[in-house]
């Protein structure tokens, strides 16, 4: 029996469902981070005493910087998931971009946007 070169349409649909679920969650998380950055909840230090305000502004700046980094990371994750959906449409999903072999389904279920097999990933180190 020859080695599989791509996933079946049924398998691709399973992966599509996993990706769409993760994409929905990721977009929701991104929206929360964006709201934190824009301070839309109104919980700031404008109505507190001047001394407390100085202390809080430093913490608020650090918190916003961290939220900004998290938001950037989340956007990259969303883009990677969207790229995986394109690969499903092209029927190239699950093929390692270095070795050309199929990435094991277990890895794709855990990391649905993966483009490298474990072997290729370990070879990068």
Image (cartoon, rainbow, N blue to C red):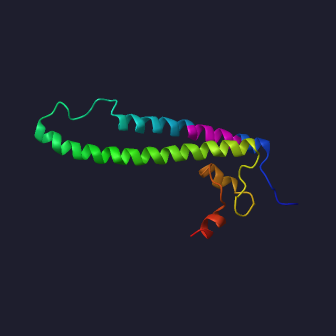
Q: Quadrant of residue 63?
A: top left
Whole-percent x, y for residue 112 in the image: 62, 48
Residue occupying image coordinates x 70% and y 57% = 103
Q: Quadrant of residue 47?
A: top left
Main SS, magenta residues: helix
Farthest-out residue, right? 1
Horizontal placement of 113 versus 57: left or right? right
Whole-percent x, y for residue 60 in the image: 27, 43
Horizontal placement of 41 versus 47: left or right? right
Horizontal placement of 101 versus 115: left or right? right
Whole-percent x, y for residue 86 in the image: 69, 42
Quarter of the picture containing the N terminus is bottom right
Q: How many marks?
A: 0
* Residue 61 drawn above or below residue 98: above
Residue 18: in magenta span? yes
Residue occupying image coordinates x 41% and y 37% = 34
Residue 34: in magenta span? no
Q: Which residues are magenta?
A: 14-23
* Residue 26 drawn above or below residue 92: above
* Residue 51 drawn above or below residue 40: below
Quarter of the picture containing the C terminus is bottom right
């Amino acid at each position: 029996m020859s080695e599989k070169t791509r996933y079946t349409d049924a398998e691709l649909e399973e992966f599509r469902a996993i990706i769409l679920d993760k994409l929905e969650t990721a977009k929701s998380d991104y929206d929360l981070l964006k709201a934190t950055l824009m301070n839309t909840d109104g919980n700031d230090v404008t109505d507190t005493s001047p001394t407390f305000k100085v202390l809080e502004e430093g913490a608020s700046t650090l918190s916003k910087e961290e939220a900004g980094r998290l938001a950037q990371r989340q956007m990259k994750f969303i883009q990677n998931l969207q790229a995986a959906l394109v690969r499903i449409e092209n029927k190239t999903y699950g093929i390692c971009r270095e070795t050309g072999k199929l990435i094991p389904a277990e890895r794709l279920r855990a990391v649905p946007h993966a483009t490298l097999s474990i072997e290729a990933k370990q070879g990068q180190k």
